[in-house]
Image: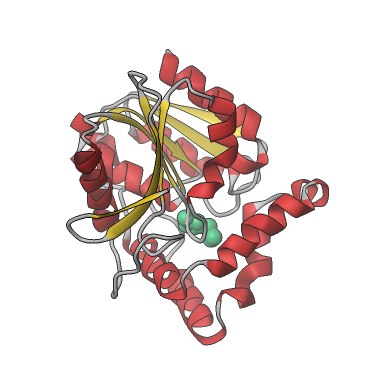
Amino acid sequence: MSKIKLQHTTLNYVFDDFKKEQTILFSNSLGTDLTMWDKQVELLGAEFNILRYDTRGHGKSEVPAGEYSIEMLGKDVLDLLDYLKIQKVNFCGLSIGGLTGQWLGIHAPERLNKLILCNTAVKIGNAEGWNSRIEAVQKNGLDSIVSGTQERWFTPEFVAENKDEVDAVLVKFVQTPLAGYISCCAAVRDADFTAEVSKISVPTLIISGTEDAVTTIKDGGFLMGKIPNSLLAALKTAHISNIEKADDFTKLLIEFIKN
Ligand SMILES: O=C(O)CC1=CCC(=O)O1
């Protein structure tokens, strides 16, 4: 792991540089960190260079004061790529990571080979819901929403069979800096790409979970309808599809990037 002080913040990242032509850049979801992609890293082997980072406010990245926006998160990615002198990547982001991916697809297509938008939507939830979540965690901490988080993130079947794995993800969740979580909730609350998403022209794979109640399969279908060069794949998962169906998810990723 390395830390780099960029223009606006300091990011924690891991770059597995296998000297391959193509790089995959993974962007984590709210309340997780770059370890959420461990299974993909294991399954991908050395086929692509792999770059992962902790979104600002998360993991070991800095927690700048104040609310964030998806534009800020997108610019952090561009700064990181400039620092590492990587011209183009295949960007794979889940949930808030998928919002960052949409911003990049709209504003920086020259830095993308392909885009993978997972368990995301042009707009996630509504302002009321995000404000009440912010209020709840301000008052009672992240511990107070851990059981609801588990329900949104994983199906009961997956939890029953993978208790230790789920617990490890939730331990990371409660370790997320509270201020960073809140600032990213504000970024999700304020993001709405409905009017702009059709500007995305790079080839795009949308991955949705059939059991995902946060960013539904309908949200995935909406993205596909708006993004001209896109296709939609559905996995039988709740929100964190890359962990719940790691093999299928990674196969989709490889097939899409290679073809
Ligand atoms: O509600 C959740 O925890 C799911 C989620 C919404 C945005 C994100 O990144 O995760």
**Residue closest to the far bottom:** 139
Quick check: can you spot residue 252? yes
The quadrant of the rendering that contains the C terminus is top left
Residue 96 pos. (x, y %): 42, 53
Q: Residue at x 51, y 44 (%)?
A: 119
* Left or right: 77, with 124 as reference point: left
Residue 98 pos. (x, y %): 40, 45
Q: Is residue 114 above or below residue 157?
A: above
Q: Is residue 247 above or below residue 29?
A: above
Residue 127 pos. (x, y %): 40, 69
Q: Residue at x 71, y 58 (%)?
A: 167
**Residue closest to the far front:** 2
Residue 136 pos. (x, y %): 53, 81
* Left or right: 131, with 169 as reference point: left
Image quadrant in which you'd find residue 78: top left
Q: Is residue 99 above or below residue 185?
A: above
Residue in the foreground of this view, choosing between 187 and 84: 84
Residue in the foreground of this view, choosing between 14 and 89: 14
Residue in the foreground of this view, choosing between 216 and 79: 79
Q: How many marks?
A: 0
Residue in the foreground of this view, choosing between 13 and 96: 13
Image quadrant in which you'd find residue 181: bottom left
Q: Is residue 98 above or below residue 61?
A: above
**Residue closest to the far right:** 160
Q: Residue at x 55, y 54 (%)?
A: 214
Image quadrant in which you'd find residue 110: top left
Quick check: can you spot residue 196? no
